[in-house]
Amino acid sequence: MKQALNQKELAFCIHYHSLQNPREAALAAGYPADRAARAGRALLARPEISAQLAALAREEEGRDLASQVRAGLHRLAFGSAADAAKLLFWEEDPGPQALEGLDLFQVAELRRGKNGVEVKFFDRIKALEALAALDRPETTAGTALPFYRALLGSVEQPAEDGGRDD
């Protein structure tokens, strides 16, 4: 028999669905900061949590692009950059497995230079301005799309030829 989710667990599901980061979702749901990462991972391992997240995903399938843009901008404006900051303090190469668990949504550009790791973040102020513009009555939902595309376009794309200068 399935166990019903309590209010805190349901809040975790809603926040995780939006943030896609177990630690941030657990913090937002009210779990203690010193145990948020562990609690988030433990919650994701539970079948009833997975079922709730699947239900939220099914509901989102019909969501329009403007709602998805709003969610992305909200995450850029208010999301945590803690995982990206961890990269600055790693003394050794973390390897791909360690990087898979990091939430790097806030990162616009990441490169390793002669002085170590360089991290460029998306502009939170611009994301906040775009969110505010969405809430103005005279603003249509479609006006955020050009900003969102420009934001995505501001990231340098890697060369498809493996970085060779021919």
Image (tube, rainbow, N blue to C red):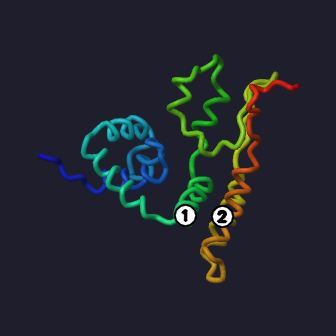
Near-viewer residue (54 or 118)? 54
Query: In the shown orientation, is residue 65 left or right of residue 111?
Result: left
Q: Secondary structure at mark 1?
A: helix
Q: Secondary structure at mark 2?
A: helix
Q: Amino acid at mark 2?
A: Leu
Q: Dot 2, how many residues are within 10 Å of its Cα: few (below 14), some (14-19), or many (20+)?
A: some
Query: In the shown orientation, is residue 33 left or right of residue 142?
Result: left
Quadrant of the image containing the C terminus: top right
Q: Amino acid at mark 1?
A: Leu
Near-viewer residue (27 or 127)? 127
The first of marks 1 and 2 along the sequence is 1
Task: Provide residue 82's location: percent of width, then percent of height.
Answer: 58, 39
Q: Dot 1, how many residues are within 10 Å of its Cα: few (below 14), some (14-19), or many (20+)?
A: few
- 38 vs 61: above or below: above
Q: Residue at x 31, y 51 (%)?
A: 9
Query: In the shown orientation, is residue 136 left or right of residue 68?
Result: right
- 37 vs 66: above or below: above
Q: Mark 2 sits on what residue?
A: 145
Near-viewer residue (56 or 12)? 56
Which residue extends farthest left?
1
Which residue extends farthest bottom?
138
Task: Provide residue 101's location: percent of width, then percent of height.
Answer: 50, 32
Q: Residue at x 28, y 48 (%)?
A: 51
Q: Answer with the quarter of the image where residue 90 lies.
A: top right
Q: Residue at x 63, y 71 (%)?
A: 142
Give the spatial CA distance, label 1 vs label 2.
8 Å
Which residue extends farthest right?
166
Which residue extends farthest top?
92
Circles 1 and 2 in contact, beta carbons < 8 Å: yes
Q: Tag on residue 65?
A: 1
Task: Provide residue 41's location: percent of width, then percent of height.
Answer: 38, 36
